Image (cartoon, rainbow, N blue to C red):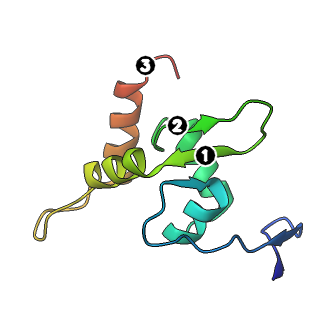
């Protein structure tokens, strides 16, 4: 199914992930998480996305299920805990990536 992204470009909906998936594309993870591609690229640029793997001669980055699950678990917030503010998140990213 073809749709338009935020910039009006034509895009296709990625195939859904199987319950036992081992590798996923950027498009599939974006669809799974309900993010826009721009949000995902911001996560990657700020060092907050899981590690990805680029195939030989390939353009698209693929993500291992184990890396994704670990990344997701690290962002879990227990019930009753306050969500970090945007300022706290930016400070954490800055401290984790001092070169940026």
Q: Residues within 10 Å of mark 3 (few under 14, many from 20)?
A: few
In this rendered view, identify the residue nearer to me: 68 or 7: 68
In the displayed structure, would residue 62 be above or below residue 92?
Answer: below
In this rendered view, identify the residue nearer to me: 31 or 62: 62
Q: Which labelled disc corresponds to residue 46?
A: 2
Q: CA distance from mark 1 to mark 3?
A: 26 Å
Residue 28 pos. (x, y %): 61, 64
Q: Give the residue pinned by disc 1.
A: 62
Q: In terms of secondary structure, where does tag 2 sit?
A: loop
In this rendered view, identify the residue nearer to me: 91 or 67: 67
Is residue 27 found left or right of 83 in the rendered image? Answer: right
Q: Give the residue pinned by disc 3.
A: 98
Residue 37 pos. (x, y %): 67, 59
Q: Quadrant of the N terminus?
A: bottom right
Q: CA distance from mark 3 to mark 2?
A: 11 Å
Q: CA distance from mark 2 to mark 1?
A: 18 Å
Which residue reaches farthest bottom?
Answer: 1
Residue 4 pos. (x, y %): 84, 75
Q: Are marks 2 and 1 in contact (CB under 8 Å)?
A: no
In this rendered view, identify the residue nearer to me: 2 or 47: 2
């Amino acid at each position: 199914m073809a749709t338009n992204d935020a910039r009006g470009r034509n895009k296709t909906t990625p195939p859904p992930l199987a319950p036992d998936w081992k590798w996923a594309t950027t498009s599939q993870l974006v669809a799974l998480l309900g993010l826009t591609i721009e949000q995902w690229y911001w996560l990657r640029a700020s060092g907050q996305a899981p590690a990805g793997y680029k195939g030989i001669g390939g353009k698209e980055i693929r993500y291992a299920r184990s890396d994704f699950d670990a990344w997701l678990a690290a962002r879990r917030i227990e019930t009753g805990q306050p969500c970090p503010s945007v300022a706290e998140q930016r400070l954490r990213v800055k401290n984790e990536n001092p070169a940026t």
